[in-house]
Image (cartoon, helix red, strand yellow):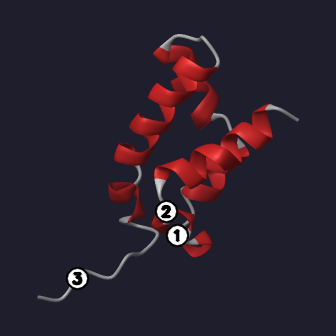
Amino acid sequence: MMRPKVTQQNVHLFIPDKVSKICGQLSRDYNMTVNQAIAKVYASKVYETLSRESSKLWQEGWVYIYQLLKEEIDK
């Protein structure tokens, strides 16, 4: 079976599961509500990069992406 080609138009299909896991971990690690974590993720440069197909960050696991986000937050 052939996998569909990932493009900028459909990359959003690969992001929600990763963001969900990242937000859960972020809320636990930084003692914030899930809504605060969601806002933090969607306002981050990491999310901006994640949402660009050309970055290929969407191919990475959520733990790696979470580590990038933590580095951004802790700066």
Mark 3 → mark 1, Cα distance in angstroms: 16 Å
Mark 2 → mark 1, Cα distance in angstroms: 7 Å
Vertical relation: 22 (above or below) 38:
below
Give the mark toward the camera: 3 or 1: 3
Vertical relation: 12 (above or below) 8:
above
First in sequence: mark 3 vs mark 2: 3
Check disc 1 and report the residue beneath it: 53
Q: Quadrant of the C terminus?
A: top right
Amino acid type for the residue under numbered disc 1: Glu
The percent coordinates of residue 16 (x first, y second) are 37, 44
Q: Quadrant of residue 70?
A: top right
Tag 3: Cα neighbours inside 10 Å, few (<14), some, or many (≥20)? few
- Report the number of numbered marks: 3
In this picture, residue 74 sits left or right of residue 23 = right
Vertical relation: 26 (above or below) 60:
above
Residue at 64%, 18% in the rendered image: 30
Secondary structure of the residue carrying tag 3 is loop
Check disc 2 and report the residue beneath it: 58
- Residue with the most extreme right position: 75
